[in-house]
Image (spheres, coloured by chain):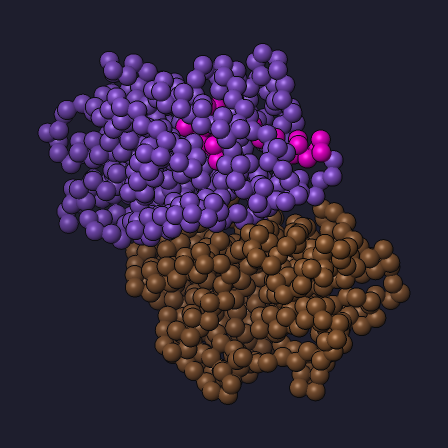
Chain colours: A purple, B brown
Amino acid sequence: MPVRPKVVILGGGFAGLRVLKDLDKDLYEVHLVDRNNYHSFPPLFYQVASSGLDPTDISFPFRRRLRQKRMKDARFHLGEVKSVDMYRRTVITDNETIGFDILVIAMGTTNNFFGNPDLVDKVYTLKSTGEAIRLRNEVLYRCERAAIEKDPVKRKKMLTFAVIGGGPAGVEVAGAMGELKRYVISRDFPELSPLDITIHLIEGSDRLLRTMSIAASQTALADLGKLMVNITLNRTMKSYDGNVITLDDGTTIECGLVTWTAGVKAVPFDITGIDNPDTLFGHGGRIITDDRCRVKGLEGVFAIGDIGIFESDSYPHGLPQLAQVAIQAGAYAAQCLNSKSWTKPFSYKDKGSMATIGRNKAVADIKGTHLSGFTAWLAWMFIHLISLLGMRSKLTVLLNWTWAYFTYNTALRLLLKGSKYPLRGDLDDNG
Amino acid sequence: MPVRPKVVILGGGFAGLRVLKDLDKDLYEVHLVDRNNYHSFPPLFYQVASSGLDPTDISFPFRRRLRQKRMKDARFHLGEVKSVDMYRRTVITDNETIGFDILVIAMGTTNNFFGNPDLVDKVYTLKSTGEAIRLRNEVLYRCERAAIEKDPVKRKKMLTFAVIGGGPAGVEVAGAMGELKRYVISRDFPELSPLDITIHLIEGSDRLLRTMSIAASQTALADLGKLMVNITLNRTMKSYDGNVITLDDGTTIECGLVTWTAGVKAVPFDITGIDNPDTLFGHGGRIITDDRCRVKGLEGVFAIGDIGIFESDSYPHGLPQLAQVAIQAGAYAAQCLNSKSWTKPFSYKDKGSMATIGRNKAVADIKGTHLSGFTAWLAWMFIHLISLLGMRSKLTVLLNWTWAYFTYNTALRLLLKGSKYPLRGDLDDNG
C-alpha cells in the first residue's frame, strides 16, 4: 500500500468505534487509542451495578474487533491520553507518544461534581464498568452487614440509598434498587424486611427524564412509585459528608450510600503547542467544532460524540450527549475523511430515546409517539441487544435477561473478592 | 420446630457445602460462614486467569443456595473467621460473634510460601477468583505494554512468564499460557511474535503431576512441549527478587511474571479457651482428626476437606487435598450428625483424577486406566460441567467453551478497570 496519512482515534466508544469501522483503510493508516483494552456499553452499566449483567457481557476487546474484516492493518494502543501536542502533532499517553496526521477526538465524558471535588471520595458513580462493580459490591456488602445488625436504626441507615439526578442513568439505577427492595431482599435475606430499605431519587428540575416527553416523565414517576422509590423534584444536593445529605432547601437526609448521576463533563486532557488552547474548550469542557465536526482553529482535528460541541439552529446548546449522536457523528467524520468532496454539514437524525425503570416497565419516545410498560420494555431490550457488539455478548446478555425474567433472580449477585471494599483506590478520574 | 442444636459450618467450599446440603434441618439449626458471599470452583480458577471464563461463571451465591429445597431456615453469615473460642463455644469473624453447639471446620487451604513471606508481594497466585483476575490482568497488561516496546530485550523480559510447581494447577496454567503464545498472540497482537513469549514451568520432583500415573506425567510433559513450554524438573525456586528467579542449583532466570502454585497450607485461624491449642494442628497447619473427622481433643467439632487430616493405613500422610475427598468427607460428617448410630469410619473412594493441558489435551487416571488426548479432554470438560453448581453456570460455561473451541477465541480477554494493576492491595492472605 502507498504511504497513507495516519489517522489517530482517541477513544473507542460509540463515536470512535464507528470511525474505526467506516474509515477507508486503503486511504488511511488507522490507530485507535483507549484507556481500556475493550469497548464497553454505557447504557447497561446500571445493570452491572444491579447484578443483572457482568462487565464482560457488555464489553468487547478492541483487538478482536481489529481482526475482523475491513480492518486491514489498523492498530490498537492501550493508554490514557494526557495531552495533544499540536506543534509536533503527537498524542502523549501514559504509555507512549504517537504521531498523527489527522486526529479524531472521541473520548467522551466523565463525572462532573461541579466544584465539589471532595464528593469523589464519598459518592458512587456509574461512568465505567469499574464504577458499576464498585457500586454493586457496596450494595451487596451493606445488605450482608445489615443482615447481622441488631440495632434497627443502624440497620435502616445502612440500607438508605440515595440517587442524585433524575436522568436516564438515575432513573434506571433507582429502578434497579427498587427491584432489589421489592423482589430480592425478602427472598435472599430472611434476616431483613423490604421496609428496612429506603431509596431516594433527587432531581433538580421539575420532572424526571427531562430530555424526554412529559408522558415519559409521568410514567417514570408512577413506575418508580410502584417500586417504593421516594422521589424529590426541584431539589439539588448541596453537600454530602458521607453520612448526611443536605439539599438546597436545607432538608437533610441520613444516607449511607449516594449514587451520583447528576452531571458529566468532557474527559479532560491538555492541548499544547498553540496559543490560548483554552479557547478551544466550551461548556462542560467540551471541544468546540464547526458544523462539520472539525475543531475550530486546529488543522485536521475532529471532535465527535459527547466530547464535541457545535451550535445549530435546532440545537442552540449543542447536540444531546447520546449514543445515537455519537454513532452518527462517527459515521459522518469517516465519510468526510473518505471522500474529500463531502461537504454536507453534520445533521443528527433523532431515532428517539428510551429508558427502563424495571421489570416490564420502560418508557420510549419514538418520532412523537410515546410507548410505555411491557411494549416499551421489550423494545428497549431488543434495541440494546442488537446494539451490543459481538454475537457472544448478545447470547450471554439474552441468557441472563431471560434467566432473570423467569426466575426473578439476577444471576450474578457476587461480591467479587479484591473489590469487597470500594475500589476507589484503583479508579482514576475517568472511572 | 423444637429447639435444635446449632451447627455452624466454617467455609462454603466443596466440603462445607455438602454438609450444608445433607444435614437434616429438622434435627439441626444450620449456619454457614464464608468470607465470600458465593461458592466458587477452584478447579477452574486457571481458566479465569487465562480469560476463558468469568468469575461469575464458576461462582454461585450462597443465599440463592439457601433458598433451594431442604434448606429450611439455614442461615448465611458473611465474614472471615478470626478465631474459635472453645470455652464460650463461639466463632469470632471480622463482622460478628456466632455461638455454636456443633462446629464443622471446612475452610480449606491458602498459598504457602514456605517461610518466604516476601514472595507474597512478588508472585501471582491462583487460590481465589480475585487472584485469578489479578493474574489475567497482569498477563494482558504485559502483552499491551510489550506491543509498544521498541527494545526487543525489554520486550522479551516483559513476556517471560514462569510457573512454579508442576501439580495440576501449575500444569494447567502453564498450558493456558502456552495456548496464549500459540493461538492468541499472533492473531491479537500483530506487533508481537509468539517467539517474544517465553514460558517456564519449574517442578521440584522428577515428574509433573506426581500425584497421578507415570503415563499421565509423560503425556503432560509431551503436550506442554508441543505448546513450547520450557520445563525444568528436580529444581525448586530458592528466591525471586521481582526480576530474577534463582533456582536451588544457582541457575538464574530473568522473569517478569512468576505464578506460584508450589504449595498450600491450611487457612490459619486461632483456637482459644483450651490448653495448648497448638497440639491440634498438624503438618501444613491442618487440623488433626480421628478417622471419623472429629477434631482430636475437642467436643463436637469436625474438620473436613483440605483443612483436616488423619492418618490411615492406606494414606499414612493423610488423604490427598482434592475436591472428591472434600465432598465425600462432607457427606460423611453430615451422616454422622444425622444418625447418632453411624459409627463407620470415613473411607475415601478414589474416583480418579484428571488435569487438562490445553485444547484437545488432557490426562485422566480412572481406576487404573489412563486416558489422554481428546477423550480425556472431553471427559474432563464433562465432569467439570456437571460438577458446577447451578444450571446458569453450566450453560454459560458450556457457551464459553464451545465458543472458544470453534473460534479459537477466549471471549473474555478484558483488562478490567479497577484492577488494571495488581490487586494485591485488596487481597488478604487467603486471597
| In the image: residue A75, left or right of residue B5 | left
Residue lying at the far front of the rendered structure = B1
Secondary structure, magenta segment, majority class: helix
Name above or below for residue A203 compared with residue B24.
above
Residue A353 in the image, given as x and y percentages of width and height: 31, 28
* Residue B4 appears left or right of B140: right
Camera-side residue: A347 or A224?
A224
- Left of B314 or right of it: where is B384? left
Q: Taking B364 as reference, is B85 left or right? A: right
Q: Position of residue B66 (x, y in %)?
A: 60, 54
Residue A155 found in image quarter: top right
Residue plotted at (32% across, 56% down): B188
Residue A163 lies within the magenta run = yes
**Residue visible at 17% across and 34% down?**
A335
Determine the image quadrant of residue A273: top left
> Looking at the image, can residue B334 be seen?
yes
Q: Which residues are magenta?
A: A152-176
- Residue B84 percent location from the top left of the image: 79, 58
Expressed as whole percent of the image width and height from the top left, the position of residue B75 reads 66, 52
